[in-house]
Amino acid sequence: GENVEQHPSTLSVQEGDSAVIKCTYSDSASNYFPWYKQELGKRPQLIIDIRSNVGEKKDQRIAVTLNKTAKHFSLHITETQPEDSAVYFCAASNSHRDDKIIFGKGTRLHILP
Amino acid sequence: ETGVTQTPRHLVMGMTNKKSLKCEQHLGHNAMYWYKQSAKKPLELMFVYNFKEQTENNSVPSRFSPECPNSSHLFLHLHTLQPEDSALYLCASSHGDREAFEAFFGQGTRLTVV
């Protein structure tokens, strides 16, 4: 089955700097890669996703890149702000085969003042 | 609110008790999921139901028993749990088709086994 590895587990960046979180997946058939943000005491919520037919997607300060050959994808947050502090989860799934969404172990992002 | 509601929000139960967690969605989704969130495994998939049929049981112990009576409701029946089962149990739903895959999560049930 699919296995998703996520690094780092904890990340601290100065406010205004950029943050990068990286994930790898094992199943070459996976074709959908969402990123979820979970603030303290709240539920995970989708912030951006990418499908396997594109290599990059951007939404304001957030961007995701996908390298299908290497089976890795990354989340980039620019001009970080205090409200970006949260746990971020990457995930992978195969929309053509089943509905399993397999998550990485999460990255706790701290934005330092 | 994401449209996915879980009850109760908090539950404390003894190891010999039987209890049930409930999840309800009115988003018209066909797929529903149970995830376990703990410090060791932050988002661990337990069960998947698609069009009321169980399509995934991720090697979950039999003391956890899911039930999906219809596309809008999902239950997790608990019996003879262990202290290590204490965790946040999250329900999620998605369209379950090939084009709309976003999973919407409930607020979760914080379970403590004593």
Image (cartoon, coloured by chain):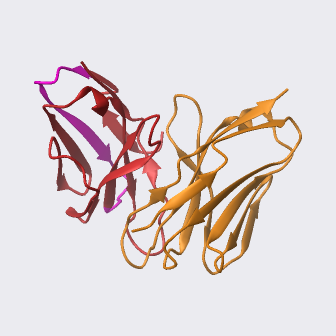
Q: Residue at x 36, y 72 (%)?
A: A98
Taking depth in this image into account, of B92 and A9 the one nearest to the observer is A9
Q: Colour of chain B?
A: red
Taking depth in this image into account, of A23 and B55 the one nearest to the observer is A23
Q: Is residue B60 highlighted in magenta?
A: no
Image coordinates of residue A84 in percent, x first then y, are 72, 38
Q: For residue A106, what is the image quadrant?
A: top right
Position of residue A103 relative to residue B65, above or below, is: below
Image coordinates of residue B38 in percent, x first then y, are 42, 35
Horizontal arrangement in the rendering, residue A57 relative to residue B55 (left or right)? right
Horizontal arrangement in the rendering, residue B63 relative to residue A82 (left or right)? left
Outermost right residue:
A16
Q: Residue at x 24, y 18 (%)?
A: B114
Chain drawn orange, letter? A
Q: Residue at x 24, y 50 (%)?
A: B60
Image coordinates of residue B104 in percent, x first then y, are 45, 50
Position of residue A26 relative to residue A74, above or below, is: below
Which residues make up the magenta segment? B12-30
Q: For residue A81, what is the image quadrant?
A: top right
